[in-house]
Amino acid sequence: MSRVYVGMSGGVDSSLTAALLKEQGHDVTGVYMKNWTQDLPGMRCPWADDLADAKRVAVQLEIPFKVYDFEKEYKQKVVDYMIDEYKAGRTPNPDIMCNQEVKFKLFLDAALEDGADMIATGHYAATRDGRLLQAADTNKDQTYFLYRVDRTALEKTLFPLGNYKKPHVRKLAEERGLVTAGKKDSQGICFVGSVGIKEFLSQYVTAEIGDIVEKESGHVVGEHDGAIYYTLGQRHGLSLGGGLPYYVVGKDMGKNIIYVSRNLSDESMWRKTLSLDHLHWIDGPPQEGEKLHVRLRHRGLLLPGVFSGSSLELEESERAVATGQSAVIYRGKECLGGGIVA
């Protein structure tokens, strides 16, 4: 059997991953990736608790345990990327960048150099011959976050939870007495946690108060505390009272203006043709004009469309597709890759 290094985050998914692989006869080593340790106002970073939980599970399973320190690289490749994208007025997904740059590049390379044959994680996904496939649990499927992983990395990766549904994962962890069996899933962006993106960004950017302008009339209807904090389609956090709710339909980062409308049918809110930048294909691009499906957010619906060149034509217009977010393309159960919405 293979020598497998398992990325152990201290959660139930990666804990069960390690247990299952050991039971299958693999030579398993647990690895905690130390990516982010900074506390934020109102939130203590739980990294030390997570590390302790991962260690406890490794002791339970009687497997070797290591810590890989990627904090410097993580700040450069993931956190700074996210901050720069927001500064430019886009809506990035740092978890996708974390998988591309850290888990399936830095971790993989370090593990192979250390003598591993394969790596494994607790992601809900599946691989077959270097191809990326959706998980059996469609509600937990995480292929959206994995579309930028290279085929060569997927060929060296195991996803043991791909055929399990989350409730069954917890049940299997309980049956094995794993100390993380009842631990709650982490919420939100990995390093932002529960404080919210606005609170996180405020630690790294200086935002200025600006006008909220009604698109149709051009009238100033309120003030915002920084255009960087708002995204297309946003309704909450505008603090504009009275009547029907306003939605963000545009923003001018140079003038620090947010444009809003009460009209849900406003053309700025709907897109049918998507231009994609930074395309990444796991096993080559799809055929021109091929009918495929696209997912525009985690757990979002799979929307039918046709891909051509670097653009995607949806069958029906979709609301609130913000620049910077990922459009992930599927052929049946297979995740082909995708790109960043321009």
Image (spheres, grey):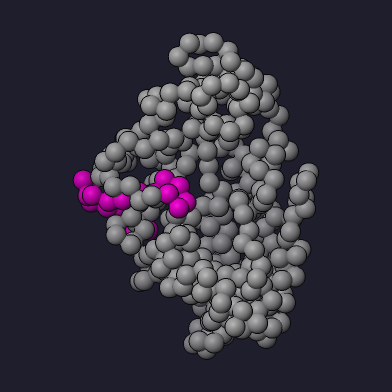
Q: Is residue 228 visible?
A: no
Q: Is residue 34 above or below residue 213?
A: below
**Image check: 331 left or right of 298?**
left
Q: Is residue 93 visible?
A: yes
Could you say which is closer to the camera, residue 307 or residue 186?
186
Could you say which is closer to the camera, residue 214 or residue 35?
214
Q: Which residue is found at the position 63% from the left and 58% from the top?
A: 186
**In the current view of this chain or complex, which residue is farthest to the left?**
289
Q: At which x and y percent is residue 69?
A: 69, 62
Q: Which residue is found at the position 66% from the left and 37% from the top?
A: 198
Give the magenta part as a residue range: 282-300
Q: Which residue is found at the position 77% from the left and 53% from the top?
A: 44
Q: Is residue 323 above or below residue 25?
A: above
**Image check: 309 left or right of 145?**
left
Looking at the image, how many numbered discs can be counted on the residues? 0
Q: What type of secondary structure mainly makes up the magenta span? A: loop
The verdict on residue 296 being magenta is yes
- Quarter of the image where the C terminus is located: top left
**Image check: 101 left or right of 314?**
right
Q: Is residue 299 above or below residue 243?
A: below
Q: Which residue is found at the position 58% from the left and 13% from the top?
A: 220
The verdict on residue 105 being magenta is no
Q: Quadrant of residue 46?
A: bottom right
Q: At which x and y percent is residue 18?
A: 58, 78
Q: At which x and y percent is residue 148?
A: 45, 54
Q: Is residue 263 above or below residue 123?
A: above
Q: At which x and y percent is residue 128?
A: 36, 71
